[in-house]
Amino acid sequence: MRFGLLGAGRIGQIHGRSVAAHKSASLAAITDVDAKAVAALAQETGASVAKSAADILADKSIDAVLICTPTDTHADLIEQAAKAGKAVFCEKPVDLSADRVRACLKVVAETKAPLMIGFNRRFDPSFASLQQRLRAGEVGSPEIVTILSRDPAPPPVSYIARSGGMFRDMMIHDLDMARFLLGEEPVEVSALASCLVDPEIGKAGDIDTAVVTLRTARGKLAQISNSRRATYGYDQRIEVHGSGGMLRAQNMFPTTVERADSRGFATDPVMHFFLERYLPAYRAEIDAFIAGVTAGKPLNPSGEDGLKALLLADAAEASLKSGKSVKVA
């Protein structure tokens, strides 16, 4: 399978390298406004440099595209790629507007283009194992899902201003994970949030500390805790309490070495950020995309999964503004 890469930033470089290293795929072409980034990745992977996304989409020898460009370009590029007959892998979100996402998915359905959305955490080995064991009934029926996700430090305020807000930018991963683990659609969302980390984030109209609760029609609950600050590293934990026990996935560490002395036990700090923490997940999701497209099987997470996570983020924002629980459409 020959790939074209649209966007050679941090995540584009990760996906490009994963494709280039895959035994059943090759990275054929790359485009980005950053000429230096494109040139460096092209030299590393053996790909050619394309002048534009249009050139890649017009190339009939390219079977699939990786969309790793800014969010406000995703929906347009998905539609263009679908009409060009390409299989599409797109980083989350499809768009910040649910209506725009619906319009985009209509084009995808009409063209029957394979589309997968990059919710990489579903492919994390620990989280994927937890979900499989949960579905196997190892701890009975899930009752409470608890998700902790905290960044080591906030992003620049310039990023905050165009991110779509904490719920759509950061927590959307956890909202998708809650659906993945609950096995049922949340019907009600309640949110509380503050700006405790950086006052400039508040001035930009966003929040940096949030707690969201989801409830399904059968009463199953999910609790999500997000913060833009964790002094001890990239905090990523999940716990599922079920009718017959509990499953838990802990943080990842560079090594498992512990030191013990009179002060107690000490370990390495947790992995610093998402690029290190989720590298195996990024590789696994590209493997799943290639395998699914090759076999002609449905791709997950799908465009519909992207829409449903966005609707939960929208509901969380509405709850925060109203101070009340919000029903999910």
Image (cartoon, rainbow, N blue to C red):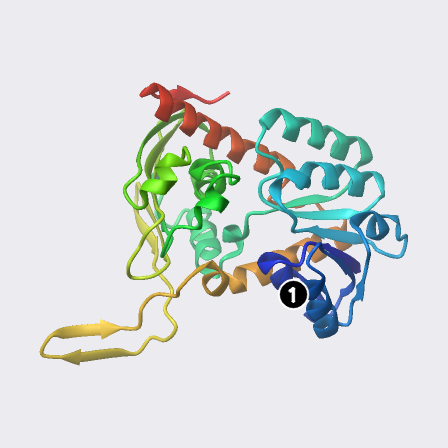
Residue at 53% in and 33% down: 310
259 lies above or below 23: below
Residue 201 in the figure: left or right of residue 265: right
Residue at 48% in and 52% down: 132
6 lies above or below 256: above
Choose between 47 and 26: the one closer to the eye.
47
- Res 288 seen here: yes
Query: Measured from the top left, where is residue 209 in percent x and y?
Result: 32, 41
Quarter assignment of residue 188: top left
Query: Measured from the top left, where is residue 75 in percent x and y?
Result: 69, 36
Residue at 42% in and 36% down: 204
Farthest right residue?
A: 60
* Residue topped by disc 1: 18
Residue at 36% in and 69% down: 253
136 lies above or below 25: above
Binning the other alpha carbons within 10 Å of mark 1 as few (below 14), some (14 to 19) or many (20 upward) gives: many
Query: Measured from the top left, where is residue 54 in percent x and y?
Result: 83, 47
Residue 194 in the figure: left or right of residue 54: left
Q: Amino acid at mark 1?
A: Ser
